[in-house]
Image (cartoon, helix red, strand yellow):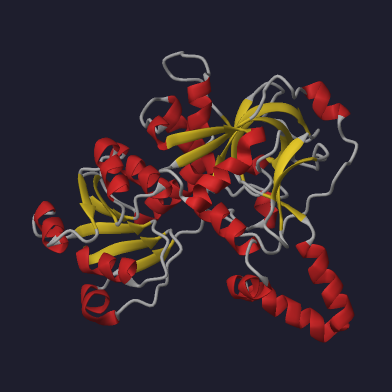
Amino acid sequence: MKQITQKLRSGEMQILEASIPAMGKGQVLVQNFYSLISAGTESSTVKAARKGYIGKAKERPQQVKQVIDTLVSQGPVQTYRAVMKKLDAYSPLGYSCVGEVVDMAPDVGEFQVGDVVACGGQSACHAEVVSVPVNLCVKVPQRAEGIAHSEEYFKQAAYNTIGAIAMQGVRQADLKLGETCAVIGMGLLGQLTAALLKVSGVRVIGIDVDPAMVKLGEEHCLDLALLRDDPGIDGKILEYTDGIGCDAVIITAASKSLDPINFAGAISRKKATIVVVGDIPTGFDREPYFYKKELTVKMSCSYGPGRYDPEYEEKGRDYPVGYIRWTEKRNMQAFQELISQGKIDISYLTTHVFKLADAPQAYDVILGKTEPYVGILIEYDQKNASRKDAKAQRKEKIVLRPSAFSLRP
């Protein structure tokens, strides 16, 4: 099968022939229809890989610490060999896809061959066939109106992982019907967050530095769309909220500036909640907003409860619904239900679709910013992979290792 990879030493993108992934206990083998490129996470990974050794070290201080620990315990020779081995490895990319079940482990009972499923996690990568743990895989339901699955439907279902991340941020905000939430950062994640808020009966204010993203949100999912540098933006938000301020603010922006978190404090009402979803610093100014308003700041952990827990993700041990209502898998299921019922339509987010053979061009668009983009999908030839192919092609051709230098969503 074919898979998109990058070499960590140089950041070179390649489409390689790889073995069909082996299925472990509790895993599902899926033939991909589409996978979504996460422009933020994946571009950071590729940019880091294309930097020199010093640049790589600055981007990954935690890995530098691991190298130093290895140097102390094993000496320079073994440390050098270990680092070079990682840098010479091919690293998979991607973590959100949709496809058809072609096989499953004997202990998997909730899926059947032929089911259309949406997948998440590091194993849901850009490849023709992926093997995904059962708790990171959900059925894509038929549309409630009885309309069969379609290519356009599959494209929306491929947003599975980003949709779950957005949904977890919304749940952390804990908003009630009729309340107001501001979303700071109207990129792909912000657009999805706003769409989920709007369908839940929340009034949505969207803020971004990019006029194109503000306009896109205004056309589809925002009640009030504002540029960050709009004159009197604080006053406009205060007027829109009848002098109250926002009941919650969800930050989906990625920035090295303290402006997003401090601005969130400025536009919040007393005792409001600020949810941090994006990659921003949180060393906010205590005065005059956070202390005097008694604001609550929450971190939203990726797809939801279960994320980064090996017992849940790798061993398939679910959390009882009576104790944890919304796990990462249940967030994915809820997101797919909203799409299937037509309550959200995110088709407008897909600006580019690349065939697998042309996938490196997709990263050129993202890194070079040669043209506007929002959602970028990789399309796979559904006729070339089948259950028979998946079982027959287990002969190993190249080993792909998850990278210690790659970002985990």
Q: Residue 190, percent across and down?
A: 37, 49
Up-down: is 255 above or below 37?
Answer: below
Q: Nearer the viewer, residue 209 or 172?
A: 209
Q: Does the rendering let one see residue 357?
A: yes
Up-down: is 281 above or below 87?
Answer: below
Q: Identify the image quadrant of residue 242.
A: bottom left
Horizontally, residue 94 falls left or right of residue 276, namely right
Q: Identify the image quadrant of residue 286.
A: bottom left
Callout count: 0
Q: Nearer the viewer, residue 254 or 120?
A: 254
Q: Does the rendering let one see residue 119?
A: no
Q: Residue 357, percent across and down?
A: 67, 34
Q: Residue 71, percent across and down?
A: 80, 82
Residue appearing at x 54%, y 35% in the figure: 158
Horizontally, residue 88 falls left or right of residue 63, namely right
Quadrant of image for the C terminus? bottom right
Q: Nearer the viewer, residue 82 or 240?
A: 82
Q: As drawn, which residue projects farthest toward the bottom?
A: 72
Up-down: is 175 above or below 351?
Answer: below
Quadrant of image for the N terminus? top right
Q: Residue 135, percent across and down?
A: 64, 43
Horizontally, residue 62 falls left or right of residue 281, namely right
Residue appearing at x 72%, y 38% in the figure: 130
Residue appearing at x 50%, y 51% in the figure: 368
Residue appearing at x 55%, y 28% in the figure: 140
